[in-house]
């Protein structure tokens, strides 16, 4: 199969699962097909699916990742103030690194809003439905929502990284409190501790809680850099921590903090 054939196969199989959508016409253009496929993956509940689907999905998504381009984290320049810290503006789903951090919700099963722009949706869309199934298995065993400030780890599947660390940041409604600050610092510590205990030597953080969860960007960056720096002072295993940003405003904030 080529990419177009794989895309048609995946869309048809997902439409078969959901009778209410079976009458949807598959767009003729590739961009419309990609958007429909991502939407169907986003809304799919975490239940098993056949091995043939997973094989075709993995072939399709891994090819998409290669065609989009992969950024090797080892080639990124380090901060002049700390050789173990890196600032990079780009798409975290293209980063080759031991682990990337996903800013998840408390259910930890990904974003179900079709083609939503949050990092949770982007990571699950590129990784594929195995990621939601892995998260569902973890959360079913746990039996309750993931607490704020904690973290879980899963394989990355079709992402160019090896693992995804899922953490739930604090949601800020109104005034920022000390509890919010402690919880956000807990996200960074939990991810670093879990990464180290899992044998990872490099990790990339997104801007936890600053998007849909409304944590002020400057304060969040201050906490991120301070918490990571303090952790690295007592740790020798983690060789590289990347602060990944997407917006120019966040890049400027971290650039000032990291020299």
Image (spheres, rainbow, N blue to C red):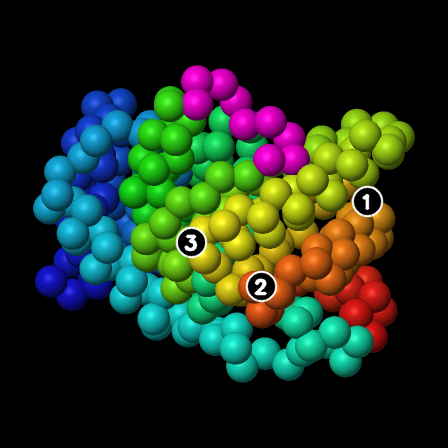
Q: Nearer the viewer, residue 122 or 227?
A: 227
Residue receiving disc 3: 163
Q: Can residue 29 be seen in this snapshot?
A: no
Question: Which label lies toward us, 3 or 2?
Answer: 2
Magenta residue span: 142-150
- Earlier in the chain: of badge 2 and badge 1, it is 1
Alpha carbon separation for disc pair 3 and 1? 28 Å
| 29 on left or right of 178 | left
In contact (CB < 8 Å): disc 3 and disc 2: no
On the question of residue 202 being in view, the answer is yes
For label 3, the SS is: strand
Identify the residue at image location x=73%, y=35%: 183
Relative to residue 163, is residue 34 drawn left or right?
left
Quadrant housing the N terminus: bottom left
Query: Which residue is identified by label 2?
Result: 238
Distance, label 3 to label 2, CA atoms, is 15 Å
Cα–Cα span, label 2 and label 1? 27 Å
Image height check: is 89 above or below 135? below
Residue 61's x, y, as percent?
29, 58
Furthest toward the top, the residue is 143
Closest to the observer, 139 or 128: 139
Q: Earlier in the sequence, mark 3 or mark 2?
A: 3
- Residue 245, position as x, y percentages in the image: 66, 61
Residue 9 versus residue 199 in the image, above or below:
above
């Amino acid at each position: 199969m080529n990419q177009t054939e794989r895309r048609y196969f995946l869309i048809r199989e997902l439409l078969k699962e959901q009778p209410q959508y079976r009458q949807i016409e598959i767009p003729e253009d590739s961009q419309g097909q990609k958007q429909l496929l991502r939407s169907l993956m986003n809304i799919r509940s975490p239940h098993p699916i056949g091995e043939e689907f997973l094989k075709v999905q993995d072939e399709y998504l891994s090819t998409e990742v290669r065609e989009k381009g992969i950024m090797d984290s080892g080639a990124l320049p380090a901060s002049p103030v700390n050789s173990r810290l890196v600032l990079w503006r780009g798409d975290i789903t293209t980063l080759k690194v031991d682990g990337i951090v996903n800013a998840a919700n408390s259910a930890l099963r990904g974003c179900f809003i079709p083609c939503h722009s949050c990092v949770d949706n982007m990571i699950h869309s590129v990784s594929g439905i195995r990621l939601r199934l892995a998260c569902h298995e973890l959360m079913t065993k746990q039996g309750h929502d993931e607490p704020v400030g904690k973290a879980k780890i899963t394989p990355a599947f079709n992402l160019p990284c090896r693992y995804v660390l899922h953490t739930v940041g604090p949601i800020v409604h109104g005034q920022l409190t000390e509890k919010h600050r402690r919880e956000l610092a807990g996200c960074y510590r939990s991810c670093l501790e879990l990464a180290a205990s899992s044998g990872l030597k490099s990790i990339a953080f997104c801007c936890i809680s600053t998007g849909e969860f409304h944590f002020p960007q400057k304060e969040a960056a201050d906490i991120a850099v301070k918490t990571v720096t303090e952790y690295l002072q007592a740790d020798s295993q983690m060789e590289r921590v990347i602060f990944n940003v997407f917006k120019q405003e966040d890049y400027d904030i971290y650039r000032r903090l990291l020299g």
